[in-house]
Image (cartoon, grey):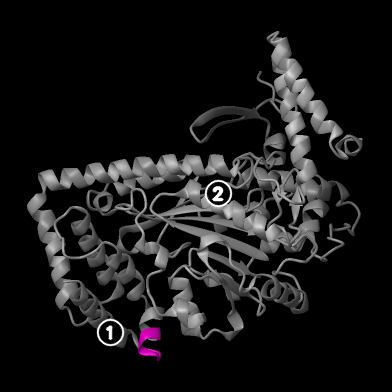
Amino acid sequence: MSLEHFMNEAISPWMREDGPDSDIVLSSRIRLARNFANFPYPIIADEEKLEEIRLFFEKEFAHQTFQHYGEFEFIPTRELSAIEKRVLVEKHLISPNLTKFSQESGALIAQNEQASIMVNEEDHVRLQIYYPGLQLQQALEKAFELDDWLEEKITFAYDETRGYLTSCPTNVGTGMRASVMVHLPALVMTGQINRLMPAVNQLGLVVRGIYGEGSEALGNIFQISNQITLGKSERDIVADLESVVHQLIEHERNARFMLMKERNTQLEDRIYRSYGVLKYSRIIESKEASNCISNVRLGIDLGMIQQTSRTILNELMVLIQPGFLQHYAQKTLTANERDVLRASLIRERLQLES
Amino acid sequence: MLKCQECHERPATLHFTQIINGQKREIRVCEVCAKEKGYIHYSEEGYSLHDLLSGLFNFDTPSIENQQGAFQQVQELQCPSCGMTFNQFKQIGKFGCAQCYHTFHPRLEPIFRRVHAGNTKHVGKIPKRTGVHLQKRKQIEEYKRQLQHLIETEAFEEAAKIRDKIRALENDGKIAGEDA
């Protein structure tokens, strides 16, 4: 196994499995932030100190197997090209900030890409677990187990009153960010989203685009996560988030039903036009592609389009990203060149399915 | 006139309604306590986490500096472990090491309160390996709470069982000495 293993497929193996409510919830993720008790944090530490931590991870955890997620591969970020780094970000295996704090950063990525551990990002350790569909509780239990597994060999910075001591005060306590990726095309089409999202914010949750903070909601995909990490247990945070997501799912399903009933022809037209664009266009920008992909995915969920599998569209969302396109081409591409390659890859991929 | 619910001295000139996860709470405080306890927020309209944080740290820090302002040189808080000063912390909004939490302790309550909707205490996971004693102590505390309740409701049989559980935990290991 090597870096290539993580680079070649746009879709992670676990994404091919179906999860609960996966017509709307693409994935659930739990991230835990941890630090070594006796080392300065990456924001201030000397590189030698951080090197010690990186080497420790390579020695203790590289090539170790954790449960069914498979063997961990250690990827030192200094050995990554700009494009390779971008692909790992687009696949959500590392964060864009991983190289921001230290040259000594890296990531342990499990073979099935469901678990990964970033080393020397903002915190010394940031572990994350993904599950398909709405499975936050399952992801939390597994994240706790992975945390315990690491803790057998590391003494984490912890305080009885403040909990896990993170670098940023916004993470202190549980150090946990629970998030779900939801596809809400009908709520966007009916404009209900503008009413719902402020309400979600009011409940202490954060709504973002597909690539986290500051990113746009491309393809009607939204990331919803908890804001507060102190004063509430992990299980309560997850339960509250899940209950809000359940309500969003219900609203989205109602909106879909309403659109089918009252604007069926317009809806069908929209979905099939998008399908046509993806199938036949020769030049396509990522924004247009994301919208079309979202519409086609809706068409699949509603049973209008039957010859295409749902997951091909999760795959396309990553495939059309700049990093992945350039990795595919094995060179840097201009924006125009990317639009051409994007159109051709989408055509090819849809061809395979029909 | 309504007195401030924090200091019970000055008149409550500021009234807030705080809604956290659907639970409504009325807060009536004076301006001094509002600042000290972190009830006063900067504008949250269209806020991002970054805005919130920078607003938070640029907030006029109360009392200590003002009082000592008479002396020209104010001894600034500095972490003995990583060297970070409180001013640096305010600027970058990040701690330099675990020790910083201890060093800056007197200044942190209002910050946590504001970032975490009024919360300042962790109630979640305890580390499995290094937190064994803590887990046990928390378990004993929980049993003691149950015991109290059982005694109040005169469920003595149940209470005796819980008492035995507490004894068993206390006798098992070094926990008894630790509480001292």
| Measured Cα–Cα span from mark 2 to mark 1 | 41 Å
Q: Residues within 10 Å of mark 1 (few under 14, many from 20)?
A: many
Residue A211 sits in quarter = bottom left
Estimate the x, y position of residue A233 in percent, counting from the top left: 60, 41
Tell which subunit mark 1 falls on: A
Q: Nearer the viewer, residue B112 or A36?
A: A36
Percent from the top left, x then y, of residue A194? 32, 48
Name the amino acid, label 1: Leu
Return the chain for callout 2: A
Residue at 43% from the left image edge and 72% from the top image edge: A90
Q: In the rendered structure, find residue A341 and report the number of the disc placed on it.
A: 1
Residue drawn at (48%, 32%), measured in percent from left and top? B22
In the picture, the disc for residue A141 is 2
**The residue stretch that appears in magenta:** A327-332
At label 2, which amino acid type do we have? Glu
Asked if B163 appears above or below B171 in the picture, the reply is above
Say if residue B52 shows up in the picture: no
Q: Are marks 2 and 1 on the same chain?
A: yes
